Amino acid sequence: MSDKISVGLFGFGCVGQGLYDVLNHSQVLEASIEKICVKDQNKERKIDMSNFTFNHEDILSRKDLNVVVELIDDANEGFKIVSRAMNNGVNVVSANKKMLAENFEQLYELQKKNKVALLYEGSAGGSIPIIRNLEEYYDNELLDHIEGILNGSSNYITTKMEVDNLSYEEALGLAQENGFAESDPWLDVAGFDSKYKLCLLTIHAFGIILKPDQILNLGIQNISFDDILYAKQKDARIKLVAKGYKSGDKIRVYVLPQFVKRGKPLYNIMYEYNAVEVEGAYSDRQTLAGKGAGSYPTGSAVLSDVSALTYGYKYGYKKLEKMIRNGNGNGHYDPSSMLDTNFELKVYVRYNDRSSLDDLEIVSIEEEYKSPHSNYIVANVKFNSLFNLYNKREKDLFVCVVPEE
Ligand SMILES: NC(=O)c1ccc[n+]([C@@H]2O[C@H](COP(=O)([O-])OP(=O)(O)OC[C@H]3O[C@@H](n4cnc5c(N)ncnc54)[C@H](OP(=O)(O)O)[C@@H]3O)[C@@H](O)[C@H]2O)c1
């Protein structure tokens, strides 16, 4: 690829504008944004209108652009743009984790078929360089465990509730004002955003492609002050944690709120900050932390990908390719059979109406509290039964993992 990079940019929202600014301040990278495609013809823009188009073809059919950067908030349109660009032989950078997670198998095939690069460091962990690290630094390490706070808005909300005594609604409003929340905040607070990122990390950490629907996510949308108070009494904080870890020859993956005890690396990750803990058989535990969302932190991760293209960087997918080659020990690669959902998990469940616990398969109750104001149990439940609570918007239940010491 030539040293001079000519970029066709899709999206000029929070991240697109961040990329535009950080690129213009870059001292080293010789790159220019030649055209920007957006959607809304009536929106005011902070740069001259001659930079913009509303027609995808004005970028996709140009032969002089050598990188397409896709930063839009629509997964279906994003997939069309990214696959068209790759089929045209153009390298692509994206931060659209929903699009990437939902279409990963096809995107992986398109990279191989067209011999192009698709880079997406900004899609998981914002400014934290985790994907390239999992791919390159931990390429020979036997990774056992990866967990992290991957959603800036949820972490911002739980922090604001705990530190400033804000209500859930006030804290969510502030997260939106500051540009940390997705256009649809349900994706953040219900754990979908973290799950899309976890899908991508699972590929680079373990070489396993999972569909988002295979991964359980319950969020913080029903959290109350009672829960935060309970956590404080236990010297812990509530964090929305995305986790993947090996159990025998299978892996367990989920996104759930979790009590994080003082002294644990994730305890001090506050506001919009994200962090990822990685544990390998030989390297032991390491934590990478940084701003997980926002215009400039994400824009700078996208810029780092654009820069990596100048020296021909592509993800090698070493672990994935090894898994595909070896299969599940029988030469057949079947990621779903590598997933363990049949185990017990200790959880705190706050509820209003006890009948809402009927959805859970409770194995044993360790603690129970009832009052006219609030009720909770701490119980070992069958993990599979938590899927019964999936994607429900009712305010009745809040579930939080109680980790073993
Ligand atoms: N915000 C973050 O901190 C963050 C962090 C990591 C990853 N991401 C990901 O980055 C992507 C962009 O996020 P954002 O926060 O920048 O979103 P945003 O502020 O809502 O901006 C979205 C942009 O996409 C454009 N767009 C939407 N549909 C389009 C279409 N069909 N064709 C062309 N342009 C279209 C919009 O055009 P108009 O301007 O005309 O409305 C807008 O400029 C998303 O996939 C998000 O998940 C965001």
Image (cartoon, grey):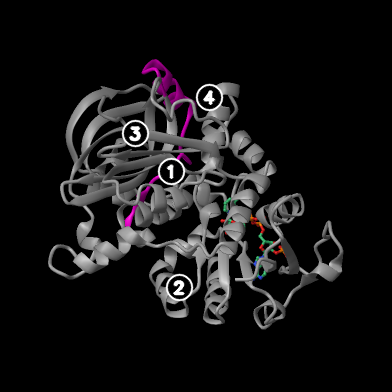
Separation of residues labelled 2 and 4 (CA atoms): 44 Å
Can you identify the residue that label 3 sits on? 285
**The disc labelled 1 sits on which kind of residue?**
Gly
Q: Nearer the viewer, residue 184 or 244?
A: 244
Residue 210, can we see it?
Answer: no
Can you identify the residue that label 1 sits on? 219
Q: Is residue 194 magenta?
A: no
Can you identify the residue that label 2 sits on? 111
Separation of residues labelled 1 and 4 (CA atoms): 17 Å
Percent x, y for residue 215?
33, 54
**Callout 1 environment at 10 Å: few (<14), some (14 to 19), or many (20+)?**
many
Left or right, 269 with respect to 318, comes to right
Q: Nearer the viewer, residue 382 or 376?
A: 382
At 52% across and 71% down in the image, what residue appears? 79
Which residue range is magenta in the image?
A: 214-236
Separation of residues labelled 3 and 2 (CA atoms): 32 Å
Q: Nearer the viewer, mark 4 or mark 3?
A: 3
Separation of residues labelled 2 and 1 (CA atoms): 33 Å
**The disc labelled 2 sits on which kind of residue?**
Gln
Q: Height in image: 395 above or below 90?
A: above
Percent x, y for residue 302?
60, 55
At 30% across and 36% down in the image, what residue appears? 354
Separation of residues labelled 4 and 3 (CA atoms): 27 Å
From the image, which quarter does the C terminus lie in? top left
**The disc labelled 4 sits on which kind of residue?**
Glu
**The disc labelled 3 sits on which kind of residue?**
Arg
Can you identify the residue that label 4 sits on? 162
